[in-house]
Image (tube, rainbow, N blue to C red):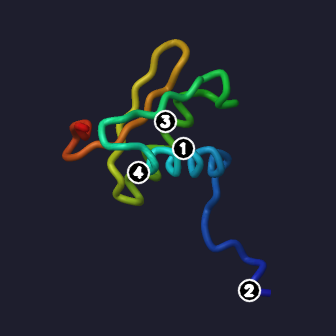
Amino acid sequence: MQADVPLGRDGKHHALVAELLHDLHELKPGMALKVAIADIGTSKAKIRSALLRVSKATKVPLATSSDAKYLYIWKTLNGKPIKP
């Protein structure tokens, strides 16, 4: 039955990426999400890659950075962080 056929690709990190993008959308300009890497459940490289794929597909420009404990995610405008 056609209703049973998946219409899109929901990758392994779909739920986490959707949650992060929702949280990012709720932030004021100039603010960044600070996500504990230990809480992600996968490598920061995989999440960063998934976020940037979705960013490109949805044309919502994002930037990421990280340190030993956290992954930081923020919106950009023309490749630069959006100022408050």
Q: Amino acid at mark 1?
A: Leu
CB atoms at circles 1 and 4 under 8 Å apart?
no
3 or 2: tag closer to the N-terminus: 2
Callout 3 amino acid: Arg
Q: Is residue 6 above or below residue 44?
A: below
**Residue type indicated by callout 2:** Gln
Query: Label 4 neighbourhood size at 10 Å, few (<14), some (14-19), many (20+)?
Result: some
Tell me if mark 1 has few (under 14), some (14-19) or many (20+) residues whose alpha carbon lies within 10 angstroms of its own: some
| Dot in front, 2 or 4 | 4
Q: Earlier in the sequence, mark 1 or mark 4?
A: 1
Name the residue tied to disc 1: 20
- Residue 40 place in picture, x, y as percent: 65, 31
From the top left corner, tell me how far across and down residue 38 is, in percent. Answer: 66, 21
User: Would you name the residue on which mark 3 appears?
Assistant: 48
Judged left or right of residue 16, residue 3 is right
Q: Secondary structure at mark 1?
A: helix
The answer to whether mark 1 and mark 3 are in CB contact below 8 A is no
Closer mark to the observer between disc 1 and disc 3: 1
Q: Is 69 above or below relative to 47?
A: above
* Residue 2 numbered mark, or none: 2
Q: Quadrant of the N terminus?
A: bottom right
Q: Which residue is mark 4?
A: 55
Closer to the chain start, of discs 1 and 2, is 2
Which tag is nearer the camera, tag 3 or tag 2? Answer: 3
